[in-house]
Image (spheres, grey):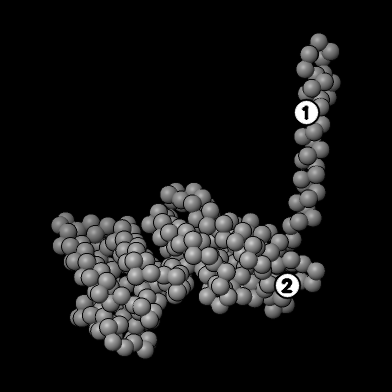
Amino acid sequence: MSWPKRSPYHAEMRSLIGCLLTFALMSDATAAEAVHDRSYWQGIIRGGYAVPAGESAFELVRELNALLGSPDPELRDHLAYRIVGVWVSGGAPFTKDELTKLQDEWQANLRDGVGRVGSDAVLKRSFSALCLAALVERDLKERFLEPQRYRELLAAALEYLAAERDLRGFDERRGWVHATAHTADLLAELSKHPQLTAEDQGRVLAGVSSRLTSAPEVFTQGEQDRLAQVIAALFVRPDFDATRFDAWLETLIAAKRQAARTSPLTPAALAAYQNSTYFLQALHARLSMARLEGAAAKSRTGVLDTLR
């Protein structure tokens, strides 16, 4: 490229362009060295999820995080999430600082583009929720979450459950989207945690009923059952608040009946009724398999009574 001699900016522009080209070439070279191809990740799974010799599990997970939002279901679900889930839940060594950094990244992803429907951005949000569930699963085995960090994660999970508008379960081209189910998985792990308080139990109950009654469509990919596992996790806690649950159940039944009486019947009212009904059926099935005593067993009977 030749610059007119009369331009007073030609020297500066040449310098600027040269710097940009150098930076671009350096960035491309770094990316080429840092990014592994599909066969590399497939090899890790074939090898029983062992961390490759000489590699850092943390650095590899940071690399896999970029694939959590991939529209390619193999890269996102069958490779990235599977490896991250196995390693973070306890299959690989991480320092507390590394786990904290991963929590920050995944937690921030829950807010990225939330509110938009039909965008691939939901994939990163949804699968970040799953990764956070694996992180809490690890914390239940070896404590590293500080109380404040646990509280922030619980708040973020409940906020995301309420805020997500893309409720697709399965997409023909993208595979599993399942944001509601994946958030339920996260809340189920959080609901097992000893740092959950009685007041938190009420917040979790409210979050689940709000999602059931606010969804504009009937969930079709088992989301009601995944939400039921959240409440089932509360039932087996030694500090299960039966009084709080029983009051919540009455409120849910009242909302369900109100939806059924809507005239003329709307798709939204029908969705609220059906989602609540399927949820209660799934909850009863899960509770029937649990060994419950005392107040928890009595509350389980209350769930069956509502179905009758």
Residue 285 in sight in this render: no
Q: Residue 83 sits in which quadrant?
A: bottom right
Disc 2 to disc 1, C-alpha distance: 42 Å
27 or 76, which is in the foreground? 27
Q: Is residue 221 above or below residue 239?
A: above
Q: Where does the image place residue 41, in percent across and percent down from the top left? A: 70, 67
The residue singled out by tag 2 in the image is 51
Q: Residue at x 78, y 30 (%)?
A: 17
Q: Residue at x 49, y 65 (%)?
A: 147
Q: Viewed as shown, does residue 176 lie left or right of 61?
A: left
The residue singled out by tag 1 in the image is 16
Q: Secondary structure at mark 2?
A: loop
Name of the residue lying farthest toward the front: 147
Q: Residue at x 52, y 70 (%)?
A: 136
- Residues at discs 2 and 1 in contact (Cβ within 8 Å): no
**Could you tell me which quadrant the C terminus lies in?**
bottom left
Q: Is residue 63 above or below residue 235?
A: above
Q: Viewed as shown, does residue 115 lie left or right of 215?
A: right
